[in-house]
Each structure stands twice: as structure tokens, then as C-alpha cells.
Amino acid sequence: MGPVEWASLLALSVLWGAAFFFYKVLDDAGLPPFTIAFGRALAGAAALVPVIVVTGRRLPLSWRLWASFAVLGALNNVIPFSLIAFGETHIVSGLAAIYNATTPLFTALIAHAVTRDEKLTAPKIAGIAIGLGGVAIMMGPSALHGFGATAVAQLACVAAAVVYACGALYARRFRALGVDPVTLSTAQLCASTVMALPLIVGIDRPWPILPTLSPGVWAAWLGLAIPSTALAYVLYFRIIAVAGATNAASVTFLVPVSALLLGTFALHERLAPSSIAGMIAVFVGLAAIDGRILKRS
């Protein structure tokens, strides 16, 4: 990790942290979750397709590959985008970002079950236990007394982290297929757009809302789609190519910080003490799974 890679990692954390801020702005404007997911995928794909053309790349024509892109698009985009957008209708953006940071916990757990080369070790088991304990702290004892809107919203954000974990493991197959990162990002966003379109036509029907949106809301939608999706994917895959997946995963620690700062100063949000305690537990769990801090100490 040289200076350029560290700068890219910090930029990526700001872009992905800002996504939670943009979600909140769109939720407050009354846009339904599938519509937000569709707009994010559509504009992200529209931003990356010219890159494919200018760089001389070509999108694959194989229907088998496109079926795989559709699965990846569902796991990486349509399902988690919609779940987070729904979750933020009832919880603050910073808390949603902390729940999203639990993705590596579920990745390690699922990888143990479905892969041969990523088995759980004692530090990883301890990290998962501590991290899930942090999730329980954030949800609080009130979740045990009945599932109100807030508890359902929190579970939606946890579910998004689980789906992201499945997407990260499914994406490993494309390395062997020789699909480069920019092409992969573009194809999955194109597939996501096609899959999300029937959802907004059949379920959301946002037509009366769209003409009433202010320029600021449209700007937030573009911000979610282009910097926080298209550009973020390019940065993320570049870090993986240059510095490896483990270093790229360090962004997990930074994204909640960016989201919390934006939520605090732009949206005037405040986290409850239990949320802060849970966040600390999640970060300790992530550090145990990552392992590098333990090795150095």
C-alpha cells in the first residue's frame, strides 16, 4: 500500500460512506426503495458504458455469462440497495453504515461453509462472535419484545450485509473466467437495471413523485449512482488489482466513519450510546477477522 493506494482507499471510503447520506436524502423525498435501486444501477451503468467503448473493451455476448452477471447484480446491487434504502426510512444513515460494516463477518462465516480455502480459525471465530455481539447491542433488548418498524429496518440492513457477503463470494468465479473488473462492474449494473425495472413498474409506481423532486434530490440520486457506484467500483477493483483483496477490505473500517460524519454534520443525526458501543464491538470483531493487527502485536 503506497501513497496512491492509501489515497484511493480514503477516497473510496468517502464515496461509499456518502452513499448512506444519499439514501437518506432520497428516502426523505419519498422515493420508494426499488426506485432508488433502479436509479442507482441505471445511472451507474450509463456512466460506465462509455468507459467500455473508449477503452476498446467489449461486453460479452455469452448468455451463460449474462446469467452469471444477473446473479451477481442481484446479490451486489438490486437486493442490498433496496434493503438499505428501506432500512434508512426508519433508522439514521450512520447506523445503517455500521450494519453494512458487518459484511466481512458474514463473508467469513459463509466462506467457511462454501469454500475449501477460507476456513474459520480461532481468531476468526472470536471476531465473528464479538461482531455479532455488537449487532445485538445495537439492536438492543427492545427487538426481543416485538418487531416494530425500527427493528425491521435494522434487520433489513443486516440482511443487506449478508447478501453483500454472498455477492463477494460469488464474484470469485469471474476471476477464473477472465472478466476484467471494469467490464464486470458495467455488466452487473446493466443486468441490475433490467432486473429492477419490473419492480418499479409493478410495485413502486413512482410516476407521481418524480415530477415533484427538487434539483437537490436529483443531484443526490446522481451522486449515489455515479461517484458512489460507478467511480467507487473502479477504485475498488483497482485497489484489489494493485494491493490485493485484503488491503481493499480495509475500507470496511473507514466507510462508517465517513457516513457518521456526513450524517452528523449534514443531516444532524445522533447515534445512541448503545449504537456507539455496538460499533466498537463490530470494529474489534473485524480487526480479529482481518488478523493483521494481532500478528503485528
Image (cartoon, helix red, strand yellow):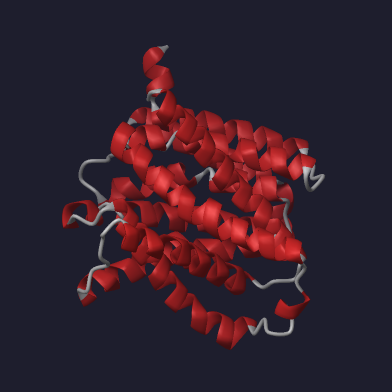
In this view of the protein, which residue sits in the foreground, 182 or 126? 182
- Looking at this rendering, what residue extends furthest in the front direction? 54
- Looking at this rendering, what residue extends furthest in the right direction? 268
Q: Quadrant of the C terminus?
A: top left
Q: Is residue 145 left or right of residue 292?
A: right
In the displayed structure, would residue 181 be above or below residue 196? above
Q: In this view, does 218 lie to the left or right of 68?
A: right
In the displayed structure, would residue 118 be above or below residue 44? above
Residue at the spot x=63%, y=81% of the render? Answer: 204
In this view of the protein, which residue sits in the foreground, 54 or 184? 54
In this view of the protein, which residue sits in the foreground, 169 or 25? 25
Can residue 197 be seen from the camera position used here? Answer: yes
Q: Position of residue 83 (x, y in %)?
A: 57, 63
Q: Where is residue 19 in the image (x, y as percent from the top left)?
A: 60, 52
- Looking at this rendering, what residue extends furthest in the bottom direction? 202
Q: Position of residue 46 (x, y in %)?
A: 46, 67
Residue at the spot x=82%, y=44% of the render? Answer: 268
Q: In this view, does 10 lie to the left or right of 20?
A: left
Can residue 149 be seen from the camera position used here? Answer: no
- Looking at this rendering, what residue extends furthest in the top direction? 297
Residue at the spot x=55%, y=47% of the render? Answer: 16
Total numbered circles? 0
The image quadrant of residue 34 is bottom right
Q: Where is residue 247 in the image (x, y as percent from the top left)?
A: 38, 32
In this view of the protein, which residue sits in the foreground, 55 or 274? 55
In the displayed structure, would residue 235 be above or below residue 286? below
The image quadrant of residue 1 is top left
